[in-house]
Amino acid sequence: MSLSSSSLVPRAVVATCLWLILSYAVAMAWVPDLWAELAAQGAVFAVTIVAALAWFVRGTWPARSWLLVPVALVPAWGLLQLALRTTVNRYRTEIAVLITASVACAFLLGLYAFHDRRVSYIFRVLAIVLGTALAALAIVQLFTSDGLVYWSIRSPYSSQPMGPFLNRDNYSTFIELVLPLALWEAVRNSRSAWLYGIPCAIMYGSVIAGASRAGSILVSLEVLAVLVPALVSRRRASYGATPRALAAITLIVIFSILAGWDVLLGRFDDKDPYGNRREYVESSAQMVADRPVLGSGLGTWSIVYPRYAIVDMRAASFHAHNDWMEWACDGGLPVLCFMLICAMRGSWLSLRYPWGFGMLAASLHALVDFPFRIWPTILCFFLVLAAMEARDSAEREDTHVTTPPGV
C-alpha cells in the first residue's frame, strides 16, 4: 500500500499535534526543570502510540525512509550504553534516551504527516506563524522587560532572554530553521507571497537585536541563499519572483535597522570571539580519544568534563559549545556519525527544497554552541528534515504527477 493511501489517523491531525507540541515546547523553553520538557515528550510518545496502533490495525507501515535508521540508532545507542553499564551516570543517559527517542518518534510522525503536500504546506505556514510570533515577542521583551521572561520571570541562568529562550544563540538557531520557510514563500509565485516579507523582516531583525554573532551571519547567508537566486536568475519563471525578492530584502533591511545593529557590531570587536570555546573543544577531543567507541554516556559531558578541563572557567560548564564534539564525547564516534548523516542529508535536500536551508545553518551553528541540547530546537530540526524527506519520497513515488521542486 502506498503512502498516499488513506489511514485511520489523518495526516492533518498528526501534523496539528506536532505543531501544538512544538509550540508548547517553545513557550516553555525557559523552564529549567524537567517536567515541562517531559510533558512535551510524553505527548509525542502518546501520539506515536495511537498512530502505531492505527497502522497496525490497518496492516501497513506508512512511513518508509532509510533515514529512520540513523535517527533511531541514537537512542538505541544510549540503551546499549545502559545495558553494558558503560555510562558514567545512568540517570543522565536515561533522560537523554527519552529525549532522543521522542525526537525519533516525532521524525517518524513527520514522515507520515508531511507526505501529503497540502498538510506539509499548512504545517510550514503554521511554523512561520510560530516563528513570527516568537520573534515579535523576543524583540518587544528585549527592549521593555529588563531581562524578565514574559515580563514576570527572572531566570538565574540568563540576564538577556530572547522570548522564552534563555540563550540568544539557541534562539537564533530556532529562527534559522524557520526563517527560510518564510523566505521561500516570499519569492514563490503566489498572490499572497508579499505577505511573507513581513515575517521575514521580523525574524531577521530579532536575530540582529539579540546580537548573536553566529546567528546574524547565518540568517544573512540564508537571505542571500534564498532571495538572491530569484534576483539574478534569467529564467522566465523567475521574473515574477524578482520584485517580491526585492520587496522582502527592503523590508529586512529596514526592520533590521530599526532593531539596531550597535550591540551586534560591538560584539564583533571582540579580539577572540572563540574565547573559552577553544578550551572546551580541546578538552572534548581528549575525551573522545579516551572513549572513541561507546563514549561516556549520552547526556554526561558536563560530568566528565572537569577531569579534562585545561583551564578554570570559575563556573560550572554544562555543554561543550560544540554539539558535534559533545555528541562524540557522549556517544562516541558512532553517534557522531548518526547525527552527521542526518545533517548531511538535510543539507543535501535543501539544495532541492530551499525552504530547508535552516538545516545547514543550524548544523553550522552547532559548531560554536549547543542548540541541539534545547529540545524545541532539535525537535524543529528533525521536523524540517522530515518535511523534506517526505516531500522527496512522495515525488519519487508519484511519477505521474509533476510537482515543481521545492514546492
Image: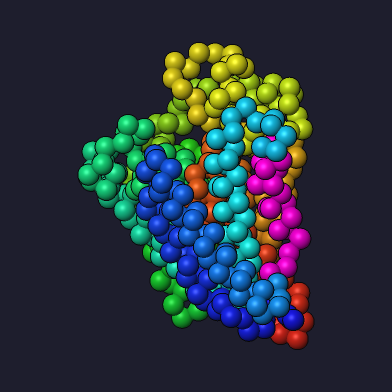
Magenta segment main secondary structure: helix
In this orientation, which residue lies closer to the viewer: 190 or 67?
67
Q: Which residues are magenta?
A: 62-81
Viewer-side residue, 157 vs 135 = 157
Q: Please report the residue visible at 49 percent of the width from the left and 44 percent of the height from the top.
A: 374
Residue 78 is covered by the magenta coloring: yes
Which residue corresponds to the image point at 55% horizontal and 47% vertical from the top-left?
99
Q: Is residue 272 depicted above or below 140 in this figure? A: above
Q: Nearer the viewer, residue 272 or 8?
A: 8
Which residue does the image show at 77% across and 32% down from the upper left? 293
Query: Which quadrant is the N terminus positioned in?
Result: bottom right
1 shown above or below 153: below
Instruction: Residue 310: name its quadrant.
Output: top right
Q: Residue furthest bottom?
A: 400
Q: Is residue 93 visible?
A: yes
Residue 135 in view in this figure: no
Residue 260 position within the rendered picture, expressed as x and y whole percent measured from the top left: 34, 44
